[in-house]
């Protein structure tokens, strides 16, 4: 029997999938990481070039490893041997057939919020990649767009900065100070409110906690 948390996620996901589809995104809900992996792979054409940025949620469901091992051309910056290769793959991934990303926050009304340091991830989501596949745990879902923006700025970004521990206020305190540090990771704050062409951006919502 499903736990209260699973039921909560399932019910909210039912609402969110309708909201996303009303905005010309495609969307499905999967209760587990394993189901999400199968659904995501079914959405990637064989032989496609596939790139990503810092796609932690996708890594957590095993999607990045599956792409590396599968019948795809992985544009894999994570295993790049040099900084130059890393930079080249970061740039190349923006125009991949399929770009895999997470979301910093989603609103039940169907908007997605992403914060980016370099801007490569949001660039690919906005334009460049032919298709975009978003993997998002239901822990990212907020009631309103305002709540989603708040989550992205006060939870996702300061938590993400704990990976880099740069010279930023949130690296030290865990609290966003709306900084202008040279190494600020919040240089682009993007709301994706509608999909065009229809179905270019696809969401796999997962009934587990993923990413940050
Ligand atoms: S704006 Fe600055 S302090 Fe706030 S989360 Fe981003 S990097 Fe951290």
Image (tube, rainbow, N blue to C red):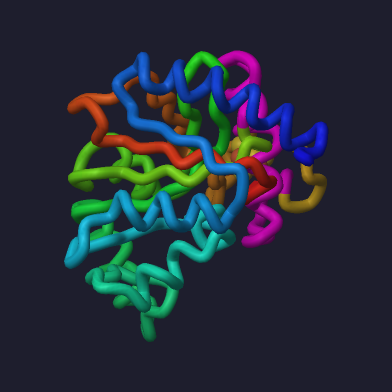
Give whichever of 182, 27 is nearer the camera: 27
Which residue: 67% across, 37% down? 139
The picture quadrant where one finds residue 170 is: top right
Image position of 11 with respect to 52: above or below: above
Which residue: 21% across, 57% down? 45
* Residue 186 appears in view: no
Which residue: 33% across, 27% down? 25
The picture quadrant where one finds residue 30 is: top right
Q: Where is residue 164 in the image (x, y as percent from the top left)?
A: 63, 61
Asked whether residue 22 is drawn in magenta, I would say: no
Magenta region, residue range: 141-170
Q: Where is residue 155 in the image (x, y as percent from the top left)?
A: 70, 37
Q: Which residue lies furthest to the bottom in this view?
A: 81
Give whichever of 162, 114 is nearer the camera: 114
Image position of 152 with respect to 133: above or below: above
* Residue 168 appears in view: yes
Q: Is the magenta stretch mostly helix, strand or loop?
A: helix
């Amino acid at each position: 029997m499903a736990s209260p948390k699973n039921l909560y996620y399932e019910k909210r996901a039912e609402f969110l999938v309708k909201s996303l589809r009303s905005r010309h995104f495609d969307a499905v809900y999967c209760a587990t990481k394993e189901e999400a992996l199968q659904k995501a792979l079914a959405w990637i054409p064989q032989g496609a070039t596939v790139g990503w940025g810092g796609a932690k949620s996708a890594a957590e469901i095993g999607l990045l490893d599956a792409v590396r091992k599968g019948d795809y051309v992985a544009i894999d910056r994570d295993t790049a041997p040099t900084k130059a290769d890393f930079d080249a793959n970061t740039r190349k991934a923006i125009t991949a057939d399929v770009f895999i990303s997470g979301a910093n926050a989603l609103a039940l009304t169907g908007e997605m919020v992403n914060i980016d340091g370099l801007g490569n991830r949001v660039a690919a989501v906005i334009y460049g990649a032919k298709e975009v596949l978003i993997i998002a745990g239901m822990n990212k879902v907020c009631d309103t767009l305002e709540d989603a923006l708040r989550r992205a700025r006060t939870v996702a970004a300061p938590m993400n900065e704990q990976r880099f521990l740069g010279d930023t206020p949130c690296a030290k305190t865990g609290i966003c100070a709306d900084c202008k540090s040279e190494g600020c990771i919040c240089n682009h704050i993007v709301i994706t409110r509608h999909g065009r062409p229809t179905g270019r951006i696809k969401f796999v919502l997962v009934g587990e906690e993923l990413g940050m």
